[in-house]
């Protein structure tokens, strides 16, 4: 199956800042893909490359099979895209901008736009410049989705929206994916993303650190804790891929991927460990383990 979005060893720098380094990814059709990363991680840069607003310094990017460097305009016309700061014709009414935009799309656009604007409760007689931040975001979303695009790219889509509309909007993303459409959204809102995303990409300082289906990521990542008999004693690392290690008094804690079933067997009576437990990690635990540079990182894969 041809990926809807494909990046191959993409590299982009701005002066001394490396915004993306060696980023490769294939996003299949029919999924909600959430790109998570802290401020400045490289999310918007990646989205701007995909939408043809920026060219990579090296590497290749394609969207719907088209090269982003050459076909930016074509791509922007066939997908739905909402930037983190949507530019709208400020002097227009919501009704007018819908009518104006419908000229670029096929029949049906205006009806769907009106429906979305009504669902979002956007007041119609108020010029865009006088709408609230959230109301403007709703107009931008309605404009981006009214032509029912194969691919929707959203940079921080829910910032400025109230909780009810956030929920309604994110649920509509799941519905889109169920119909075979693809949604790429960038976000800081980990708990929200956890409710709707099928796939997760975690980007950190321009590196794509992790790309996995959400369920697989969560079911394969564990928080392991060990209570030591002495606050100076150090336990051996648990088996599997240890992402981070931290310590609080006598308790040691690790975030571990691919923990084998017999993981406790390495902690015998002479290990200094008095109590051991493992619980499944949340997406937030995983995100912090991948992105927290202050956490001690064992960089170890211990096999049993
Ligand atoms: N046009 C530019 N000129 C110079 N530096 C830039 C430019 N665009 C981005 N950067 C830098 O590239 C890095 C990645 O920025 P980017 O906007 O992609 O991050 P982000 O993950 O979208 O962050 P945020 O969540 O804060 O929006 C940052 O260090 C940023 O300062």
Image (spheres, helix red, strand yellow):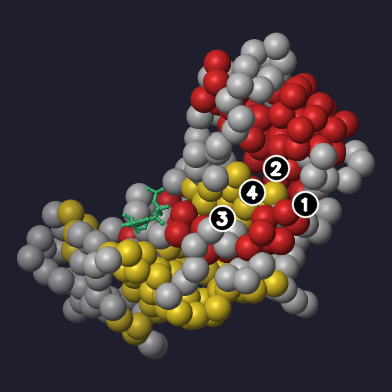
Residue on which the image places disc 3: 34
Disc 4 designates what residue? 81
**At 50% across and 35% down in the image, what residue appears?**
159
The percent coordinates of residue 121 (x first, y second) are: 70, 19
Mark 2 and mark 4 in contact (Cβ < 8 Å)?
A: yes
Spatial separation of the CA atoms under disc 2 and disc 3? 18 Å
Mark before the other along the chain sequence, 2 or 3: 3
Going from N to C along the chain, the mark reached first, 3 or 1, is 3
Task: For the residues labelled 1 and 4, say whether their Cβ atoms are less than 8 Å apart.
Answer: no
| Mark 2, secondary structure of its residue | helix
Residue of label 1:
149
Q: Which residue is at the front of the view, 179 or 277?
A: 179
Residue appearing at x 18%, y 54% in the figure:
248
- The answer to whether residue 217 is visible is no
- Which residue is at 44% across, 46% downward? 188
Residue 190 x %, y %: 48, 47
Frontmost of labels 3 and 4 is: 4
* Lower sequence index among marks 2 and 1: 2
């Amino acid at each position: 199956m041809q990926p809807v979005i494909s990046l191959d060893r993409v590299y982009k720098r701005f002066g001394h800042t490396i915004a993306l380094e060696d980023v490769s990814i294939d996003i299949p059709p029919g999924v909600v893909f959430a790109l998570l990363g802290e401020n400045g991680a490289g999310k918007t840069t990646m989205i701007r490359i995909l939408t043809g607003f920026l060219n990579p310094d090296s590497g290749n990017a394609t969207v719907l099979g088209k090269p982003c460097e050459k076909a930016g305009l074509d791509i922007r016309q066939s997908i739905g895209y909402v930037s983190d700061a949507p530019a709208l014709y400020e002097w227009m009414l919501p009704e007018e901008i819908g009518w104006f935009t419908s000229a670029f799309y096929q029949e049906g656009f205006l009806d769907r736009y009106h429906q979305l604007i009504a669902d979002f409760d956007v007041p119609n007689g108020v010029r865009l410049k006088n709408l609230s931040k959230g109301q403007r975001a709703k107009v931008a979303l309605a404009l981006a989705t009214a032509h029912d695009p194969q691919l929707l790219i959203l940079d921080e889509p829910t910032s400025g929206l109230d909780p009810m509309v956030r929920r309604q909007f994110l649920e509509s993303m799941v519905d889109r994916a169920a119909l075979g459409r693809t949604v790429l959204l960038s976000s800081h809102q980990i708990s929200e993303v956890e409710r709707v995303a099928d796939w997760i990409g975690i980007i950190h300082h321009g590196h794509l650190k992790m790309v996995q289906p959400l369920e697989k990521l969560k079911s394969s990542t564990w928080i392991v804790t060990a209570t030591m008999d002495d606050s100076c004693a150090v336990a051996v690392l648990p088996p599997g891929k240890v992402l981070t290690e931290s310590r609080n008094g006598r308790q040691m804690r690790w975030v571990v991927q691919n923990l084998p079933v017999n993981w406790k067997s390495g902690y015998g009576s002479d290990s200094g460990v008095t109590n051991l437990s493992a619980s499944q990690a949340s997406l937030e635990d995983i995100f912090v383990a991948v992105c927290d540079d202050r956490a001690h990182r064992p960089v170890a894969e211990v096999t049993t």
